[in-house]
Amino acid sequence: MTVAVAEPVLEPLLPALTPWLRTRRWFGAGGGALDSVRPVVVSVVHDEAPVLVHAVLGVPRPDGTEQLYQLFLGLRRALPARLAGAAIATVPEGRWQGWTLYEATEDAALMGVLLRSLAVRGRRDGPRLERTSAHPLPVGLVPRPLSADQSNSAVVYGDRLLFKIYRRPEPGPHLEVEALRALTERHCARTPALHGTLYTDAPGGERLVLGMFEEFLPVEADGWQSALRQVGDCLEGRDSAAPVTGGFTAHARALGEAVAEVHAVLADAFPRTRVTPEEVAEEARLMKRRLRLAAAEVPALDRYRGRIGALYDDYARHAGRGCPVFAQRVHGDLHLGQVLPTADGWRLIDFEGEPDRSAAERAEPQPVLRDVAGMLRSFDYAAQTGLAAVRKRSADRTPGLRLRHARRAEAWAIRNRRAFIAGYAGAGGADPRCHPVPLRAFEADKAVYEAVYEARHRPDWLGIPLTAVHRLAGVRG
């Protein structure tokens, strides 16, 4: 049961909790003032051992604003060996002094308690569930955490239900929940069905979306993993057809069709507007500003500023000549890791948008070609990542073999990019081949974004977007 908090439950835990926060993939405060962490919302979901505490913390940002973080915390007198990896610290004082504080999403018992608690209708305290489906929650299924290292967390119940936890909750309507609810209501076959939204009321009456429960789609590998495997087959000759067909082109074409279908449903569910030439010119100016800021952070981009900026200017002139540009709700961060090859075809997941962009930016309607450009960049990423993996495990370092592998990787990316575009156009989407100017500008903008992301998070990968920027800028040598 959820217990109303009448005492400072979380404060005694903060000294043990704050050092652990810095180790989390989803924690982005960097060198922020963790000594000023503020409990925003706290509830004891289960008051008997093992204890389950839900909390939303406010952490000051350097600019004076506050970033919210959501935690599910477990407390046990003694932690069993199976949960040793989830341990955070021993509680130094307070009600649970001497108990072990740990990450509760790793504990099947507590995640089962949480689901049963949420199934109780009419609750008015703690996290609450707003149902989308009329079907009862499958409270008897065994939960397990998903181990993917992401900016959010996820728990799967059996093989039916996925609980996605927003580690950085934001007040107001949530972009992904809005999109998935609309797609579910329109029976879109290319996305998982939404079952419910987890929320709480923050001080001041603001509704805070904490997560969602959606249909779980069991697959052996996502689109990225599947593509990497095919790249390896192509480069190393394990698939006799791979050097000719790319080994993935039928999948790439089907993926293009699936993306076009989702775009069509989103266009029906949300407003679709024509962007004025003035608005396109302003967007081109913002793209150039992002390029300037990116070059300041990634100096290797500086030599391309003139040529890439010219692509953005071409986009503005293109719209100024009367070429129509339409904007609508899109996926916002489309790549091979956001699609799943299920038995019923491709499904698109994770409609939150690019993680390093503000909520306001992510909520803005965009041309569908931005999603297309994101997927085209992902095929290039898969080819280059697969090439690096093949080179790493190959004992043959002769120049001839390295060149052959590089050419095959480039050909793999080209074939699958073309197949994706053909599938998208064939399913009724705006043919990207008829809009080369905006598509090239969006690809360049995406590659610049990727360069900044890789410089911050994965410096060893920086060469991939820089190579794309070099190609898009048309630089020789």
Image: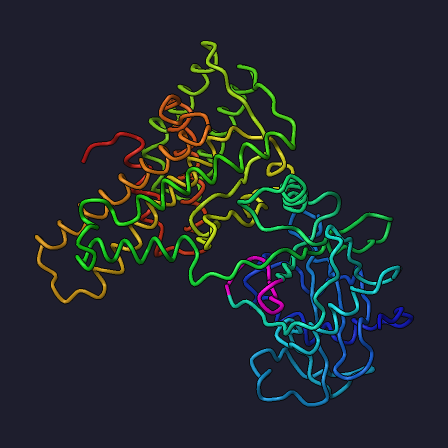
Residue 3 placement, left or right of 419: right
In front here: 300 or 396? 396
**Position of the N terminus by quadrant:** bottom right
Closer to the camera in the image, 407 or 238? 238
Q: Is residue 143 visible?
A: yes
Q: Which residue is drawn at 78% across and 64% down?
A: 118
Q: Is residue 348 left or right of residue 195?
A: left
- Name which residue lies at 78% across and 53% down: 130
- Taking 368 as reference, is 253 above or below it? below
Q: Give the range drawn in magenta.
A: 148-160
Q: Where is residue 372 in the image (x, y as percent from the top left)?
A: 43, 35
Image quadrant of residue 57?
A: bottom right
Q: Is residue 27 visible?
A: no
Q: Is residue 231 magenta?
A: no
Can you say whether 419 is above or below 275 in the image? below
Whether residue 284 sits left or right of residue 196 in the image: it is left
Looking at the image, residue 138 lies above or below residue 283: below
Residue located at (32% from left, 47% from top): 464
Q: Position of residue 275 (x, y in %)?
A: 56, 19
Quadrant occupied by the C terminus: top left
Residue 367 image position (x, y, % from top left):
52, 28
